[in-house]
C-alpha cells in the first residue's frame, strides 16, 4: 500500500512538473516579450500601425474595411522604402496615443499630429512628412471676430474643443478667457463643425483640409476667420514611445528616403492638386 502511494505521488509530481514546463515560454518567446518594438519590427519586417480615422487624411470604409487617404499612402510609401509591411492594426482616439502604444498592440502611430502639449513629453516623433496649418473657423455669416483676436478671448465666447486634441491646446494658449464647449475624443470631426454651424459654439480651431472636406457636402456653413496672429503650423510624423529611439530613427530614415528619392514629391504634388494650400512641404536637407 505504501509503495503504491509513493508511486502515485511520484507520477503526480512528474506530471505536474511537466505541465509547468510545457506552459513556460520558450527562450525565443521570452526574448521577444522582453524586447521592444524595434527588435520585433526588424525581425518580422512588419510595422503595426495605430491610426486616427480623420477624413480625408485617413479613412476606413465601414463595409469593406479598406483604408484610404493621405496618411495611408505616405505610410505605405515609407514602409515600401524600408522593406516593411504596414499593418493597420488598431484605431486610436485623440489623446490616447501613449496608452495605446504601451499596450504593445501597435508599434507606432501612422501618422501622428498635430502635436499636443499634453502628449509631447511622453512620446517620440520621427522626422515630419509634412506640416499642417490650423486656423479659427466660425459660422459663414458671423463676422464679429474679423482681425480682432481680443474679441474672442472673453468668457462670453464659446470655443469648441475636442478632448486631447490640438483644438483644446490652442484654445487654452491663445484664448484662455474664452469659454469652451468640449466634445469627447470619440466623435467624428464633422460633428465639431456641425456644432459650430448649429450655434452650440462660436468657433473651432481646425486645419483647412478637414474643413474643406466638410464644406463639400455642407456649403456655406463655416468660414475661416481672418486673424492677425498665427495659431499654429504643426508637423505630421510617426510617433512611438520614448524608449523606442531606434524605431523612431529607422522611421525617420524612411521618411528621408521617400523624400530624397522623389516619392514624397509625387504624392504631395497629387495632394496639392486635389487640395491646394492645405499643407506646407518640409524643407529638403540639400540644395541643387
Image (spheres, grey):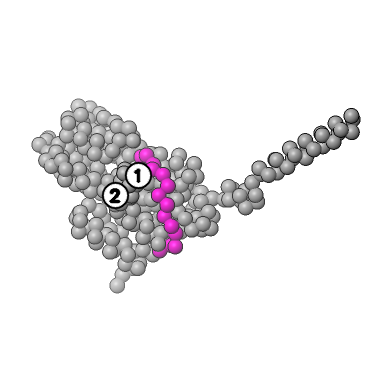
Name the secondary structure under disc 1.
loop
Image point (28%, 35%), residue name: 161
Q: Position of residue 7 (x, y in %)?
A: 85, 36
Residue 138 shown left or right of residue 89 in the figure: left
- Marks 1/2 in contact by CB < 8 Å: the verdict is yes
Whichever of labels 1 and 2 marks the residue nearer the N terminus, that label is 1
In the rendered image, the vertical position of residue 129 relative to residue 182, given as above or below: below
- Packing grade of label 1 (10 A; few <14, some 14-19, many >=20) is many
In magenta stretch: residue 3? no
Q: Secondary structure at mark 2?
A: loop
Residue 57 image label: 2
How far across and down, in percent of the image, does residue 86 sit? 41, 55
Q: Which residue is mark 1?
A: 52
Residue occupying image coordinates x 49% and y 41%: 103
Q: 10 or 248: which is nearer to us? A: 10
Residue 122, image quadrant: top left
Which quadrant is home to the N terminus? top right
| Highlighted range, magenta | 81-94
286 or 174: nearer the eye?
286
Category of crowding for the residue at label 2, using alpha-carbon neighbours closer than 10 angstroms: few (below 14), some (14–19), many (at least 20): some
92 drawn magenta: yes
Amino acid at each position: 500500500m505504501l509503495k503504491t502511494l509513493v508511486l502515485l505521488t511520484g507520477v503526480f509530481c512528474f506530471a505536474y512538473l511537466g505541465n509547468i514546463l510545457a506552459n513556460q515560454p520558450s527562450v525565443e518567446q521570452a526574448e521577444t516579450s522582453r524586447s521592444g518594438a524595434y527588435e520585433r519590427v526588424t525581425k518580422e519586417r512588419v510595422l503595426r500601425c495605430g491610426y486616427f480615422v480623420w477624413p480625408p487624411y485617413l479613412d476606413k470604409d465601414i463595409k469593406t474595411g479598406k483604408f484610404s487617404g493621405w496618411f495611408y499612402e505616405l505610410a505605405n510609401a515609407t514602409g515600401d522604402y524600408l522593406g516593411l509591411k504596414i499593418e493597420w492594426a488598431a484605431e486610436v482616439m485623440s489623446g490616447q496615443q501613449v496608452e495605446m502604444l504601451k499596450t504593445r498592440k501597435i508599434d507606432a502611430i501612422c501618422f501622428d499630429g498635430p502635436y499636443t502639449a499634453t502628449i509631447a513629453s511622453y512620446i517620440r516623433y520621427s522626422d515630419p512628412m509634412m506640416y499642417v496649418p490650423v486656423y479659427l473657423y466660425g459660422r459663414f455669416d458671423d463676422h464679429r471676430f474679423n482681425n480682432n483676436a481680443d474679441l474672442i478671448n472673453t468668457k462670453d465666447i464659446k470655443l469648441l474643443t475636442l478632448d486631447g486634441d490640438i483644438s483644446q491646446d490652442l484654445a487654452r494658449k491663445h484664448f484662455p478667457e474664452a469659454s469652451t464647449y468640449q466634445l469627447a475624443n470619440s466623435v467624428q470631426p464633422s460633428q465639431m463643425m456641425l456644432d459650430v454651424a448649429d450655434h452650440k459654439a462660436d468657433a473651432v480651431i481646425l486645419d483647412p483640409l478637414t474643413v474643406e472636406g466638410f464644406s463639400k457636402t455642407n456649403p456655406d456653413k463655416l468660414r475661416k476667420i481672418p486673424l492677425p496672429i498665427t495659431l499654429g503650423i504643426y508637423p505630421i510624423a510617426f510617433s512611438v514611445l520614448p524608449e523606442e529611439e531606434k524605431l523612431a530613427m529607422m522611421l525617420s530614415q524612411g521618411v528621408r528616403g521617400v523624400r530624397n528619392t522623389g516619392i514624397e514629391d509625387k504624392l504631395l504634388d497629387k495632394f496639392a492638386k486635389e487640395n491646394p494650400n492645405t499643407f506646407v512641404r518640409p524643407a529638403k536637407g540639400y540644395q541643387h
